[in-house]
Amino acid sequence: MTDFSIGDALGSGFGLLGRRPVSVLVWGLVSLIAGAALPLAMFGSGMLTDYLALLRSFRPGMASSPPAQMMQLMAPLQAKMMVLQPIILVVTLLVQSVIGAAVFRAVLEPRNRGLAYLRLGPRELWLALVNFVTRVLAVILILALAVVGLVMGFALNAVFEGQHLDWATRSIAFIVIGAALFAVLIGVCVRFSMAWPMTFADGQFRLFESWGLTRGHGWKLFGLGLVLAIISVVVVLVFEAVAAVFVILAAGGARWNPWAVLQLMQNPQSLLTPGFEAGLAVGALVAAYLTGALYAITMAPWAAAYRGLRPPPVADASAMFADPEPPPAPPLAAEAHDHGQADPQGDSGESSDGHEDDHEHGHADPHAGSGESGDGHGHDHGH
């Protein structure tokens, strides 16, 4: 029976950090560059003017401004964001799929390296499609469960009103219902967790096939996902801490205050201080490695789990009914009796084909007194 180890699956992600640090760094750089290219593209479309105008409008006490004024300032920016949203979605799906395929390739096909295992081909496009479909299905499932929860909540509330139950009992019942619906959501996600690695391995769209592959392994996959979620939160917190330290230092170090960051964004020229470029490069490398590490730690375990769960390859069915091949002929045994005459030019007791004769019937040469032939060698006559 196929199975996998949670420890080995987790170790596959951390193992990449040690074995392929350059690849991990490249994955992070690709992610950050793509993430930076999107804002640049948006700014190039005319959003920069609206964005700077919005930033300059902020001032201490702005939180108490009327909501209508805030919406009026943000309306032009939101309109342009709606236009660019499909482009952002497509680029995000492609970047995630390319890096995800690279992580899977590093685990399942470690010798197929290339440039940090990165490719852009049919596998990556199939992964992008699976990524999009799973997102849509997740939204539909969440909405469906929310509707079911609301219907059950109203129905139970009507029952509780008739029985005059206190709110403590009602709260417990609502919490149980919410937990049950959340468990359904997690269970469905676990059963489809092998869709990504299956699609990469087969080079075709694989989604519902994951349901059968994960049968009987739901709890182990749930435990793996839970541990990965905790690790992801820790890595994200570290990433945010590094970014916060960098921003605080750029905003004035010890003289930092909550409005210093906003002032820094309103006046980007203030960043052009001695040593800022070096600090920016170091901060970018650290952020890139943490981003790549997050990809490796969270995606490699699923590939390792799939490697343990996938069925063994099945032999060709036609070969099962084909006539068996005849066994190879045994090697010719060395003849026990060599009937070849002795080489008259030979100087050893071997026959002309290189084998010693098992039965030496040499007769004494009448011209030799010691039973040897006249040329000093015994005759090997195999009769």
Image: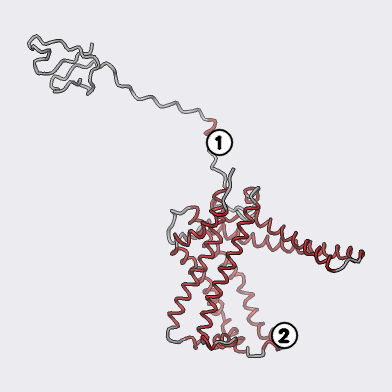
Quarter of the image where the N terminus is located: top right
Residue at label 2?
67
**Which color scheme is applied?**
secondary structure
At 50% from the left edge and 88% from the top edge, which residue is drawn?
Answer: 270
How far apart are the alpha carbons under marks 2 and 1?
Answer: 70 Å
- Report the side of 125 relative to 117 (left or right): right
The amino acid on which the numbered mark 1 sits, given as a three-letter code, is Ala
Return the x and y of residue 29 as percentages of the image width and height. 48, 69
As displayed, is residue 334 above or below residue 25? above
At 45% from the left edge and 76% from the top edge, which residue is drawn?
Answer: 282
Viewer-nearest residue: 52 or 359 = 359
Q: Is residue 303 visible?
A: no
Name, please, the residue furthest toward the top: 366
- Total of numbered circles in the picture? 2
Return the x and y of residue 55 as percentages of the image width and height. 60, 86
At 87% from the left edge and 68% from the top edge, which residue is drawn?
Answer: 166
Residue at label 1?
317
Disc 2 secondary structure class: helix
Viewer-nearest residue: 220 or 124 = 220
As displayed, is residue 150 above or below residue 253? above
Q: Residues within 10 Å of mark 2 (few under 14, many from 20)?
A: few
Disc 1 secondary structure class: helix
Return the x and y of residue 168 as percentages of the image width and height. 83, 68
The amino acid on which the numbered mark 2 sits, given as a three-letter code, is Pro
At 70% from the left edge and 59% from the top edge, which residue is drawn?
Answer: 185
Q: Which of pointers 2 and 1 lies earlier in the amino acid sequence? A: 2
Q: Is residue 18 visible?
A: yes
Q: Nearer the viewer, mark 2 or mark 1?
A: 2
Quarter of the image where the C terminus is located: top left
